[in-house]
Amino acid sequence: MGSGFADLEEYRKSIFDPEEGVGLFSRIFFFSVGNRLQKLARGSLLRATIFTGLMGAGIIFCITFTFADPFLVWYDAGYDEPSALYGVGKDGKPELIAKYVSSQSGRETIELTEEDMKLPVARAFIATEDNAFEDHWGLDLYGIARAAVVNLLAGGIREGASTITQQVARLRYLSRERSIVRKAREASLALFLEAHFSKPEILELYFNEVPLGHGTRGVQAASHFYFNKDFRELNWGEVAVLSSLTTRPNDLTPLKYPSDSARKIRVVFQRLIETGMITPTQASEAHAYLRNEYYPSLYNRYPEESYFGVRTNRFPYATAYVLQELSSRLRRKIYTGGYRIYSTINVQHQQAAEDQMIPWLKKLNERPKRSAFSRYEVFDNEAGDFLPLVQLMFDLPDYQIHRTKSQRDFSIEFDRHWREDLTLLNFMTGEMKPAMALEEDLRRSQKSTDDDEHGIQGALISIRPDTGAITAVIGGTGFESKNQQLRFESAHRQPGSAFKPIVYAAGLDYTGRNPGTERK
């Protein structure tokens, strides 16, 4: 009697101090039936067994049920969606330039239709994860019984019985903690999911949640990372790769462990054949594609490559500039608000500018770094062509050089005689400053001409005069972690003679004159 009272006291304590995840309804249930169970235990064994068995299903539900669970499912707010930036395409229609994806996300959401259920990617995941998905109501009782027998005979966990719906419940609403309480709550949430969503909607949730390695979350992000394709374009070989990653994505990734990946993919093909999704011939063709085309293509990819390094960002300078121009309110939600931002960036203009300017700037930086005009060849290349013409106009001496052990500099005689004349030359040409170069030559002869650690930089901005629309921008030699300055806007430097055509054109337009107009 004393023992029973102690057990009852302990039971009452558990009602008011339950384990995490135990709902209020379960506390009331256990308290009300506690005494009844004790009385039955002292009665016939058969009655106690029957009553206990009947209460088993109710107990499992009561353990896992919380009043918040239906609201989690019924009022699911959906996903935080990254914002997208569009430019003007060749046909004048919006064309995607970039997606502002958070470094914490790795997800690209999709919408799945009834027709999409016939796609190879849908059939492959159903076959490998939950072949009875379209028939059950959230739980696969036969699968649970089979897994229980297999695990009992193996003496450990060898096979799971989670349906796709249960996996959605775990991935979407629960932690990754392994416990009986969490597993039972997963089952009850699966029932709510099945009651509220259609099968395509549940599979859509799964496709948006399942982690598939290298920072990808969801089928669409993985499709872009592994194959640079939309998920609807994947063939049987490619969907076999993705569906092989659901259990241990970090251990079976083809980028890091191609041999282990290949073995797992063979198991997937066998499963697809057994379920009638594909024929042995189709499996052989898909496997040949992976062996001969896909796996060799991975040799040029870094094993530790991340999804965040291949996300959509075609023109980083334009992407960064648009983000900078947005209001602070929009910037705060740029990664979650799902905004569609339409810019005046012309995709053709931007692509042409990057194809021409950035390689040219990089080529300039490949030359040996030396101070301006510290050697004869540099000066001769820059000024040699027009100096004979200037010498016809002015009484200028020939320049000379003398050689030293470490460098070749202009002679002091040249420096002394040319300084004033070259200063005048500056005003005539407007292209360079030879006198300044000479003045600084001896002092800077061993220093680089680079104005910063990134070498020679350049900037470009293309604007339509009639509308003011910005159609292309470039801020330097390439958008990198240490080189993200938007120099077309932030580098406060004089444009020099490059601005003269604009001034002259405006003057001609304003006065109505042209090059043939006589001045009186």
Image: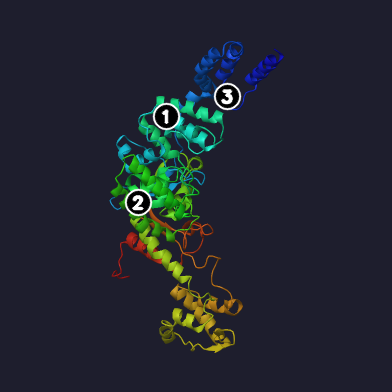
**Pick the front one: 72 or 263:** 263
Q: In the rendered view, would you say 388 is above or below 283?
A: below
What amino acid does circle 2 point to?
Thr
Which sits earlier in the primary sequence, circle 3 or circle 2? 3
**Which callout, 3 or 2, points to the residue nearer the camera?**
3
Q: Secondary structure at mark 3?
A: loop
Q: Secondary structure at mark 2?
A: loop
Which sits earlier in the primary sequence, circle 3 or circle 1? 3
**Residue 272, how many percent across, how many down?**
35, 43
* Separation of residues labelled 3 and 1 (CA atoms): 26 Å
Q: In the rendered view, would you say 16 is above or below 202?
A: above
What amino acid does circle 1 point to?
Tyr
**Pick the front one: 230 or 267:** 267
- Point 57% across, 27% down: residue: 21
Q: Is residue 415 left or right of residue 351?
A: right
Q: Residues within 10 Å of mark 3 (few under 14, many from 20)?
A: some
Q: Is residue 415 visible?
A: yes
Q: Which residue is mark 3?
A: 22
Q: Which residue is mark 1?
A: 142
**Residue 496, how many percent across, how many down?**
46, 67
What amino acid does circle 3 point to?
Val
**Residue 322, how many percent across, how many down?**
44, 49
Which disc is residue 467 wearing?
2
Looking at the rendering, in which quadrant would you find the N terminus? top right
Looking at the rendering, in which quadrant would you find the C terminus? bottom left
**Pick the front one: 175 or 73:** 175
